[in-house]
Amino acid sequence: MTTLILGQTLAFDADPFAVPPTEAARHERRGAIAIDGGRIAAAGPVDALLAAYPQADRIDHNEALILPGFVDAHVHYPQTAIIASWGKRLIDWLETYTFPEEARFGDAEYAAEIANCYLDLALAHGTTSMCSFCTIHPESVDAFFTAAASRNMAIWAGKTCMDRNAPENLRDTPDSAYDASRALLERWHGRGRAAYVITPRFSPTSSPAQLEALGALWAEHPDCLMQTHLSEQTDEIAWVRSLFPEARDYLDTYEKHGLLGARGLYGHAIHLTERERDRLAEVGAAAIHCPTSNTFIGSGLFDMGLAARMRVGLATDTGGGSNFSMLRTMAAAYEVAQLRGTALHPAQLLWLATEGSARALQTEEVGRLAIGGAADLVVLDLASTPAIAQRAGQAEDIWESVFPTIMMGDDRAVAQTYVAGQAMLRRP
Ligand code: GUN
Ligand code: ZN
């Protein structure tokens, strides 16, 4: 049975960083998406789809804007309960807030409670897919994939590995990291909509032997993604230099151990040397921009100019990031780019939060309104508060109409979220 979802629609035919942004996008003032078996069967002007599917059920979202569901390319779901913790920079923040909270995830019941809480929050904010770090505990990985499977969500996640510079109860070893990661990968990778991601936290918390072991696992499973952190704060970089005196730079600590590649996701990537930029671009790796985290923890201003050279995803970095909302994250990306002298177009922001992140994750399954893709959608009310409504009321085109929601919107703007064609939110 086909269902037609009606509203304004916005689809991308090209990368708005490669062609003029407005030319990359296709807007239907009155559009529709046809959904069959959880997949997009057609997308286009409403009249054409009503004619093609006269018997279909209809859900009319009127003036609301239908987009691909947001794809959050870097989160730590176990940090849900410590989001918005005050007053620390990266290393202190990890030690004061993050590690004590992550230590709780050896308890499978607690892990399940937070996994479910996080995914409900993500869906309420219009995020249908994400790539998440878990904790060192296999229970945290099982809990997250189980919670996602119960919602039929496409997610990417992996066991966070650390064997040094972390509390005793949060350390594994090179061998146990390899063995547990491999067992989880074999259990979850490709099961339903789940994908396993090999996950060394970052060079300061992995010995060279552990990086080597995870590099070997990646070589054995080259279809998996690998995620980690890179050059987030200057004192972190100085620490890496002292821990790896023989490395040319931070990226080299990964490269030397088989952890640099086209399916690698490098979170933050702010303070890069010329060599690091060149090398990331050369191997076709993806950088993940986490703007609310980078301002909240005081890390620095990501260079969006990288998008001309390599794939860039957008992410909340929950809970170093200060918000679950990809709308708020787009607003922060806009502000950070302004501080570096560039005004990102709304088309570029929306693309980053959907197809840009999906491309970073090397998937065509989500992030696009494309025929055959999953019907994972977000429906945005472009007048969700009086402040937004009065500004959007003056708009002369879709970009002026959507930009106030990007800058001022939150979960109140999410009229509905669909996962594989199923409405996930109870809305009047
Ligand atoms: N670097 C290593 N671990 C983390 C983390 O959990 N959050 C952030 N923002 N940076 C990190
Ligand atoms: Zn992170």
Image (cartoon, rainbow, N blue to C red):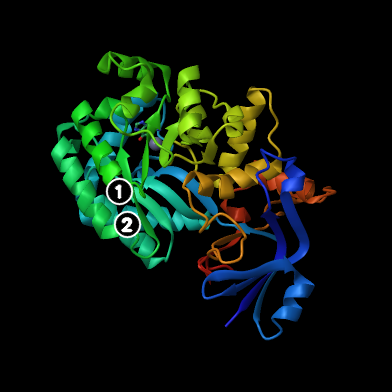
Give percent across and percent down for residue 236: 36, 20
Front label number (2 vs 1): 1
Instruction: State the separation of the CA atoms marked 2 and 1.
Output: 10 Å
> Would residue 204 appear left or right of 397 to someone viewing this image?
left
Q: Residue at x 61, y 32 (%)?
A: 308
> Would residue 109 appear left or right of 360 to someone viewing this image?
left
Residue holding disc 1: 221
Q: Residue at x 72, y 79 (%)?
A: 52
Looking at this view, is 66 or 308 the one in front?
308
Query: Local crowd at mark 2 within 10 Å, few (<14), some, or many (≥20)?
Result: many
Q: Amino acid at mark 2?
A: His
Up the image or down, 321 lies above or below 10; here it is above
Up the image or down, 258 lies above or below 323; here it is above
Q: Amino acid at mark 1?
A: His
Task: Say whether mark 1 is within 8 Å of ligand 2.
Answer: no
Q: Secondary structure at mark 2?
A: loop
Up the image or down, 2 lies above or below 156; here it is below
* CB atoms of marks 2 and 1 within 8 Å: yes
Residue holding disc 2: 189
Location of residue 276 (image quadrant)? top left
Could you tell me which quadrant the N terminus lies in?
bottom right
Up the image or down, 397 lies above or below 47; here it is above
Q: Residue at x 41, y 30 (%)?
A: 86
Label located before the other in sequence (2 or 1): 2
Location of residue 240 (image quadrant)? top left
Give percent across and percent down for residue 273: 47, 18
The answer to whether residue 87 is seen in the rendering is: yes
